Image (cartoon, rainbow, N blue to C red):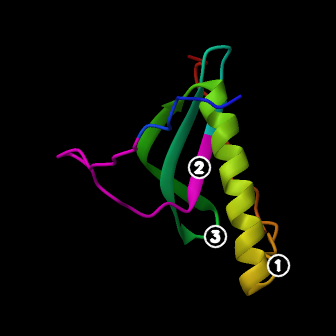
Amino acid sequence: MTSNHSQPKIQMSKAAEYQESYANSVQVRVSVWDFFLAFGVVHQESPDIVDIENTHGIYLSPQQAKALWNLLGQNIAQYEQTFGTLAIEPHPHPVPVPSGPVH
């Protein structure tokens, strides 16, 4: 059976307030309704203080969070095929995970 439904054309654009930035830290908070990702930059100017400056917060539906997880997994696999296996080194001092309200 032939389907008469064609796939829609996808157009992407950038909002006027669109910006790109760097993050070497992400914290995740989960609730029944959504996932919240807080992106930021870690600064450690002394051995006993780690400062995390959060710059962006993004809410995702659970479905979109799972789609992102799949997409990242595929892209990491391709990256490692091209450039070699990524090693995640343990931090010499655990970075504290901020606790906060569940939204």
Q: Which of the marked residues, 1 or 3, is nearer the chain's N terminus? A: 3
Q: Is residue 98 visible?
A: no
Q: Please tell me how many numbered marks the rendered image carries.
A: 3
Residue occupying the point 61% across, 43% down = 27
Q: Which of the marked residues, 1 or 2, is nearer the chain's N terminus? A: 2
Residue occupying the point 61% across, 29% down = 3
Q: Which of the marked residues, 3 or 2, is nearer the chain's N terminus? A: 2
Residue at the disc numbered 3 = 47
Q: Which mark is residue 26?
A: 2
Task: List x then y, in percent, for residue 34.
Answer: 60, 22
Does residue 40 belong to the magenta stretch? Answer: no
Residue at the disc numbered 1 = 85
* Secondary structure, magenta segment, majority class: loop
Q: Secondary structure at mark 3?
A: loop
Q: CA distance from mark 1 to mark 2?
A: 21 Å
Q: CA distance from mark 1 to mark 3?
A: 29 Å
Three-letter amino acid code at the position of disc 2: Val
**Magenta-tinted stretch:** 9-27
Q: Is residue 86 above or below residue 10?
A: below
